[in-house]
Amino acid sequence: RIKSSFQRTTLTIRKLNHFGLRPTYHIDPKTKFGIYILDLKNHQHQYWLGFGNYYVIRTYNQSFQYAMAVYTLSRDIKNARYKTLHKK
């Protein structure tokens, strides 16, 4: 089983594929990242990849929840900006 490695960016797509995991979008094979595994109900898991910016955020605050809040906020801002720019 793959282990969480959210302290460093050492994984590659090749290593992820070795564990039978596939990202939901294209990632350059040379890109390195870490992984955080969330344990869900019924022994299921959700896998989150952490790239360079994730680790920059974690230098400010080590909390995974904080990093996820920053990510969620950035995604919401991006979506709101897109909707504003593409209003008809």
Image (cartoon, grey):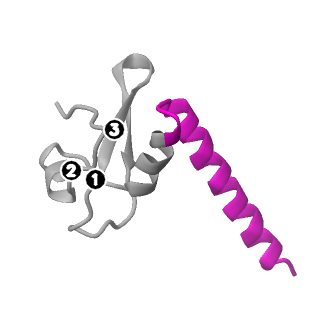
Left or right of 2 on screen, residue 22: right
What crowding class fits label 3: few (fewer than 14 Cα within 10 Å), some (14-19), or many (20 or more)? many
The image quadrant that residue 31 belongs to is bottom left
Q: Which residue is mark 3?
A: 6
Question: Are circles 2 and 3 on residues that touch, CB within 8 Å?
Answer: no
Residue type, label 3: Phe
Mark 3: which secondary structure? loop
The image quadrant that residue 5 belongs to is top left
Quadrant including the N terminus: top left
Residue at 38% from the left image edge and 56% from the top image edge:
52
Q: CA distance from mark 2 to mark 3?
A: 10 Å
Residue at 36% from the left image edge and 30% from the top image edge:
45
Mark 2: which secondary structure? loop
Residue type, label 1: Arg
Residue type, label 2: Leu
Q: Which residue is mark 2?
A: 11
The range drawn in magenta is 60-88
